[in-house]
Amino acid sequence: MHSSNDNSDPVVVVLAAGQGQRFRASGAQTGKLQAQLHGRSVLEHTLAAVAASGLGAVLVENSPLWRSEGMGHSIARGVALSPDASGWLILPGDLPAISPQSLRAVAQALQALGGVVRPQIQGQWGHPVGFSAAWKDQLQQLTGDSGAQSVVRAAQTQNQLQAVVLQDWGALADTDTLADLARVAERWDQRPTAR
């Protein structure tokens, strides 16, 4: 999946290479991204929200030629696959209830403010985190499992970390366990409708 977009828009990097061990450990028979939710897989719902946002996207998954060595490695790959983007929204693939408006809101804040943009929902940090092109080199050097936390901390130190307030519980609702998935399924009809 690689859709083209206007170069002024950031690209959504959808992270789908994780092993989902916590999900299987919670009793699931499949990986969390393959788990079914209202007739589609978790990942299909996430990708549908990205498509509805109108933003370009890169899907990072394991393949015979490439295997992720952690979230940081996946982020670095997504950035490398879209090197000319004006910025990147890093979106874990297990957020099936995220709204397209949330993705657009983070993209717009990133375009307006630059630096690093982090959504805040009811006082909690959510997804996706947006990074301007200025952070490309640091993102491409990421490895390991801590994702882009080191880049977020660097941005904070340099007063380049901005918060954007969202009213979207789906931006917090990852599906790490079967219980998480059940909670998302229960709240599904309360999702903001795509506009």
Image (cartoon, helix red, strand yellow):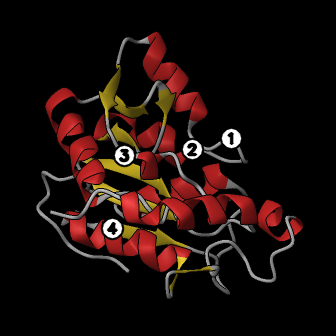
Q: Earlier in the sequence, mark 3 or mark 2?
A: 2
Q: Mark 3 or 4, which is nearer the eye?
A: 3
Name the amino acid, label 4. Ala
Q: Residue at x 24, y 37 (%)?
A: 110
Apparent side of residue 122 relative to residue 153 in the rendered image (left or right): left
How far apart in space, not on screen, are marks 3 and 4 (Cα)? 13 Å
Picture coordinates of residue 116 (x, y %)? 36, 30
Could you tell me which secondary element the residue under label 4 belongs to? helix
* Residue labelled with disc 3: 168
Name the amino acid, label 3. Asp
Could you tell me which secondary element the residue under label 2 belongs to? loop
* Label 2 packing within 10 angstroms: few (<14), some (14-19), many (20+): few
* Label 1 packing within 10 angstroms: few (<14), some (14-19), many (20+): few
* Residue labelled with disc 2: 141
* Residue labelled with disc 4: 49
Q: Earlier in the sequence, mark 1 or mark 3?
A: 1
Q: Earlier in the sequence, mark 1 or mark 4?
A: 4
